[in-house]
Amino acid sequence: MFTTQYMRTMLAAVTLGLLVLTSGCFSGDVNVTVNNDGSADLKTTLVSAPMLAQIVEQSKTSMLAKNPDAQVAPVTKENMSGYEITEHYDSVDKLSDQEFFAAHDGKNTGITVKKSLFYTDYNFDLLFEGSQNGGGAGAFASNITFTYQMTLPSAPSSSNADREEDGGRTLTWNLGKTLVTGESSPIQVSFRIWNKTAIIGTVIAVLVLIGVIAFLIWRRRKGSEPEEQKLIDGPIIDVKAEEKH
C-alpha cells in the first residue's frame, strides 16, 4: 500500500506550481470488498498527471515489494494515467499488514476481530494522517480526489462514512480533504459476518438429534407392545372348573 509520505511529496510538487495549467493532477481510490467467508479483496487505483508519474510509479513499486502476488494493470482517467493494483487476502485482519490499515499507539486501533461460533465481529478504526504542516494544496483542491470505499456482505452496525449506497453495504469516505488541508481523517466502521456453515451445521445436528430421540422413543414403545398384548391375549382360566377340583 502507498504511504502518506508519497502523497505529501506529490502535494509539495503541486505547491511549486508545476500543475497550474493542468486540468487534473491526482486521483486515488482504495476499494475493499469483504467477502462472506471473511476474506477480502483490495483494489488500489492511483492515477496522476504526467508530471507526477514518478510518484505513482514509486507507490506501485512499494506495493509490489510488499506483495509480489498483486495484480497490476495500467489505467487512464481523463488526461491522467497510472495503475490499478488488485490484491487478495485470505482474512480481513491480514489487511493490517498494510500501512493504511495499521494501528498507531494512542491514535487508532486498526482492525480488530472477535470470533464466536455463529458470527465474527469486525471493527475498523483507521486513521488517514495528514501532514503536520498542512496540505498546502488548497488552490488545487478541485484537481485532487482520493476516496476509500468498502463493500460489505451486509449493512454495518455503525460507521462514519461520508456516503452510503446499496442499503448501507457500500461505504465511501472522501479523503481528498486530508491531502489538501493536511487534517487527518478517521475511518470507522463496525460490522458482523454470520458463520452460515456453523449455523447450518448446528441446525442439521439439532434436527438429527431430534430424529434420533423420536426414533428411540418410538422403538421403546414398539418393544413394549408384545408384553402388553400377551397380557391381553393370554390363556383364559375356567374359574368354575377350578372350583370343582
Image: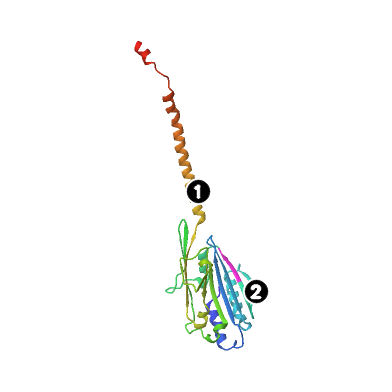
Whether the magenta-drawn stretch holds residue 138 is answered as no
Give amino acid for label 1.
Ile
Residue farthest toward the front in the current orientation of the protein: 240
Q: Which mark is residue 74?
A: 2
Are the residues flagged by discs 1 and 2 in contact, CB closer than 8 Å?
no
Location of residue 178 in the rendering, given as x and y in whole percent from the top left corner? 50, 80
Give amino acid for label 2.
Pro
> Looking at the image, which residue is at 52% across and 81% down?
179
| Quadrant position of the N terminus in the picture | bottom right
| Quadrant position of the C terminus in the picture | top left
* Most common SS among magenta residues: strand
Identify the image's colour scheme: rainbow, by chain, secondary structure or one colour: rainbow
User: Along the polypeptide, which appears first: circle 1 or circle 2?
Assistant: 2
Whether the magenta-drawn stretch holds residue 86 is answered as yes
Q: Which mark is residue 204?
A: 1
Q: Which residues are magenta?
A: 85-89
Reply above or below: 188 against 17.
above
